Amino acid sequence: MTSEGHDAGEVTLEVDRDRRWPRQLYAVGTEPDPRFSLANERTLLAWMRTSLALLALGVALDAFDDVVADGFRGPAAAGALVLALLCAISGARRWWVNERALRRTEPLTAPLSGIVLTVSLGGLALVLLTVSMTGHFR
Amino acid sequence: MSSHSGIRTHAVHMTLDWHRLLVLARDSVGDVIDAGFGPPVLVGLLAVLFSCSIIESMFRRSRDTPAAHSHRRVDDRGGTGTACVPAESVPTRAPQIGLRHDRGAQVERTALAWQRTTIALVVAGITISRLTLPHSLWVTATAAAVCVVPSAALVVLSHKRYRKSTHALSTPQATTAEQVRVQPDARLPVAAAAITAGLCALELAHVLLASTL
């Protein structure tokens, strides 16, 4: 008797029911290839890291008063932090929607939040660059 | 805690002065950092955290060795194991879903992504608590708490999740339903997103309140 047979026996003895939380996600559709679920999870984690990096940027902008002029410091930091918050929320939302789409074998969602993030980051970088340049050469 | 009043009522005595406590904590943390003990303390904390995880995984591996070994042998033979699998379980060895010993290291890559995220959370917490130290004790204390407690929990829970995924995807099971039942669910991803969003909201509130005051 190998350990596999033992494991299989144990599994069948337990209550044969899907207990995964939340039910409104795991109750729909069919079970996808676990590789896709794991990739979806890694994407969520990448969004979390992006959010944390933006958070660090916002904190640094707020704390170091010699980077940008005083009038722009608060708004720039707030902009980075709003972006960080949006990243965290939209990352979680996208994880949920994509997992549901995988279970229903529907197409995945369009990467709208990625485009929004790219454009906003570009705008923020432009503003910061302008402000810090004018501050230095004034 | 305080020695400025000689007579006090019982109620006053029982009330904790949280602000005073935080000032005390900040000063002692500042003293430790000024004395050059900050980095060693931090490295020690991280070392303790990760050695716990490593020791735990070593114990787990020694217990799992026979099963893992037999999976690998079966996998090397193209899923038609004859030597170490009972004959009646051979037809169920090709599940409709499943990775057969984590081909492409999907589970391991996910575990590493969890580790990177935990480290990023620790870094963000440390950055916030260090940079808001002169401005707001509440933000400092909350960020430090977020840095320590949920990060430690994430190290442990993501490791459990890794083991759970590995087990679910490498153990031959009779039906798809049984394999599904032992896979990890949405709790940890949702918790990680909530922690990150909470930290962002905390710092945003700090910045907005500081600029309006």
Image (spheres, coloured by chain):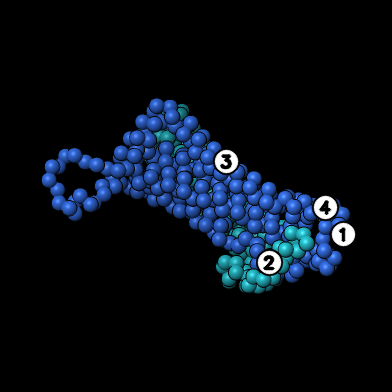
A54 lies above or below A105: above
* Residue located at (71% from left, 67% from top): A9
Picture disc at residue A10: 2
Local crowd size for mark 3, using a 10 Å CA cut-off: few (<14), some (14–19), many (≥20): few
Q: What residue sits right under mark 3 in the picture?
A: B51
Q: Nearer the viewer, residue A59 or B143?
A: B143
Say whether residue B32 is visible.
Answer: yes
Q: Chain of mark 1?
A: B
The percent position of residue A85, horizontal first and vertical second, equals: 49, 53
Picture disc at residue B82: 1
Q: The N terminus of chain A lies in which quarter of the figure?
A: bottom right
What type is the residue that disc 1 sits on? Thr
CB within 8 Å, label 2 to label 1: no
* Residue located at (34% from left, 43% from top): B137
Q: Colour of chain A?
A: cyan
A126 lies above or below B172: above
Q: Is residue B26 left or right of residue B201?
A: left
What type is the residue that disc 2 sits on? Glu
Mark 2–mark 1 distance (CA, rounded to whole Å): 22 Å
The percent position of residue A54, horizontal first and vertical second, equals: 52, 45
What type is the residue that disc 4 sits on? Arg
Local crowd size for mark 1, using a 10 Å CA cut-off: few (<14), some (14–19), many (≥20): few
Local crowd size for mark 4, using a 10 Å CA cut-off: few (<14), some (14–19), many (≥20): some
Q: What residue sits right under mark 4 in the picture?
A: B73
Mark 3–mark 1 distance (CA, rounded to whole Å): 39 Å
Mark 1 residue element: loop
Q: Colour of chain B?
A: blue
Image quarter of residue B140: top left
Mark 2 residue element: helix
What type is the residue that disc 3 sits on? Ser
